[in-house]
Image (spheres, rainbow, N blue to C red):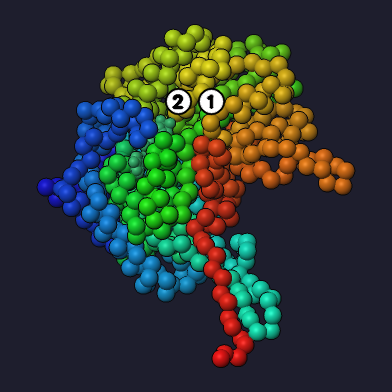
Amino acid sequence: MATNLFQTLTAPNGVSFEQPLGLFINNEWRAAKSGNLITVPSSLGAGRLAVAVYPRSLISSPRNEQEIAKVHAGGEQDIDDSVKAARQAFRGPWSAISGTQRGELMRKLADLVEAKTDTFASIDTWNNGKRFASAQGDVSELTATLRYYAGFADKLALCLPPIPEVIPVNLEKLAYTSRDPIGVCGQIIPWNYPLGMAAWKLGPALAAGNTIVLKPAEQTPLSILVFATLIEKAGFPPGVINIVNGVGRTAGASLASHTGVDKIAFTGSTNTGREIMKLAAVNLKNISLETGGKSPLIVFEDAELSNAVKFSHYGIMANQGQICTATSRIFVHKKIYDQFINLFVEQVKKTSVVGDPFAPGTFQGPQVTKAQYDSVLSYIEAGKQEGATVAYGGKALTGVNGKGYFVEPTVFTNVSDSMKIYREEIFGPCAAVSSFSTEEEVIERANDTIYGLGAAIFTENISRALTVAKRIEAGSKFESSLTVYGYSYANPLFFCTVVWINSSQDSDIRIPFGGVKQSGIGRELGEAGIEAYTQVKAIHVNLAHRV
Ligand code: TXE
């Protein structure tokens, strides 16, 4: 039976901290009721081959494969306890707290996190393998998101459509709407941005007055468990935020299927998203999913080439390629194809310095786990087998002490549209580059995917940029043109999410984010993000004489 709930750890950069190992339920640290620890950190997820379970155990560092800690694995009973605590808080103290006070608590939490920026960054660099500067950026994203949504907490009535309003009906009736929280929200997050993904979900849910059970990814729970130590300090009542670490198929599935949960929000693979939809159907939960992608990046012949090269590199190689919107399919106009490839390969060679994520000059650390490392390498192998040309990289690397899950940044050219590396999400530093001749052709090919998350367009021609942005199915569903007063427009009823003109991966908490097709359902961030955590209630008041 696992009983240790805290352990003092020292990261490789010398930063020491108190690491919680248990489950944070009702503002208390508890051991998992089953006594289980996370002993098999990762399979490849529900949809990938379920046999891919590795005999490695515990939470370890991908930079040198060494164990960091033994963390409790919550199960069905723990999820049930946390849902009950969240329900009690939702019906009790949390509902008695004003929007202004909620905002204050969120700001206080952001201040407490900010004061520990380097601790959080050290943990995620150690546990996830992302470079230190990037991990610091994730902490800023967490604090900025909490503060951004704190501003909504007492202004929900002002900013969301339909705003609470009195609806004129007749003299005998008063009708009005109010915008209410949804209730108990389950949030299941992935490992690529442990703090950032938590922030995107916690911020709007708290501001809107919901209570939460959050399940971190089993591979990277450490930073969020430390975050949990600040929740009570910030003044949140018990049960408002519960953090229950655990394995997807047990803790995650229990949360998704629990009938006491009103909403489930998930970021992760498309196949697990599909599984969660099925589990959530048991009580018709409100659901939002942000899943996989195979995002196109298009370089037209008139593009500012050095800018296109810079973002083509960043768009696929940042965060070890572990970004859902990674622009992994690069289309280059045939007139500039050779020139682009030379410059792109040069840029990758020069910028993608692979190494210890704690070292200041490193751009690319290790892949997060052995499972991901093996998966990325198997895609690289498939690319070679299917006849694509390796223009750069293509091999595994060893890192710290001859160990670690390091992969060479890899550029494939001569990629055809039927290849695995072109069609499937690799989630690693691996770009598939091909050429195109016409605008029509590249739009069709860019849209020929089950995914629809991000897209980047490089051109100096403003009308081409805007037309292509409309027609790309990156969160947009282009159907037909519309004629109004004799003018023809592209159908404005598309649901645009993330199209970048002359950049890639340009995220902003004020701007909505999400996918279409099999990249997800619903939006996060911006006002859309908070709308997703509210529901409209209609109140009919009878003013007539009652019989
Ligand atoms: O994802 P999973 P994995 C993609 C990427 C990657 C692949 C596999 O292509 O290679 O997914 O990664 C929880 N019920 N993305 O296996 O399984 C799990 O515990 C409930 C894209 O890590 O989707 C974790 O908390 N929950 C992505 C979360 O789901 C379950 C980011 C994500 O795990 C569950 C990560 C179940 N049955 C991976 N099974 C993005 N969109 O950014 C797992 N989980």
Instruction: Kindly state the secondary structure of the residue where label 2 is placed.
Output: loop
Q: Is residue 435 above or below residue 490?
A: above
Q: Which residue lies at the image location 33% right of the left edge and 68% below the top edge?
A: 88
Work out whether residue 469 or residue 343 is closer to the camera in this orientation and state it.
469
Residue 74 in view of the camera: yes
Disc number placed over residue 239 in the picture, else none:
none
Q: Is residue 416 left or right of residue 492?
A: left
Marks 1,2: beta carbons within 8 A: yes
Q: Is residue 242 above or below residue 298?
A: below
Label 2 neighbour load within 10 Å: few <14, some 14-19, many 20+: many
Disc number placed over residue 328 in the picture, else none:
1
Q: Looking at the picture, how far across and down is residue 195, in whole percent? A: 41, 45
Label 2: which residue? 426
Q: Which residue lies at the image location 36% right of the left edge and 72% below the top edge?
A: 92
Label 2 near ligand 1 (CB < 8 Å): yes
Amino acid type, callout 1 = Ser
Amino acid type, callout 2 = Ile
Ligand 1's quadrant is: top left
Work out whether residue 541 or residue 46 is closer to the camera in this orientation and state it.
541
Work out whether residue 199 or residue 47 is closer to the camera in this orientation and state it.
47
Residue 62 in view of the camera: no
Q: Which residue lies at the image location 35% right of the left edge and 67% below the top edge?
A: 89
Q: Looking at the picture, how far across and down is residue 429, in whole percent? A: 46, 24
Res. 378 image quadrant: top left
Q: Looking at the picture, how far across and down is residue 46, in whole percent? A: 35, 35
Q: Earlier in the sequence, mark 1 or mark 2?
A: 1
Res. 416 image quadrant: top right
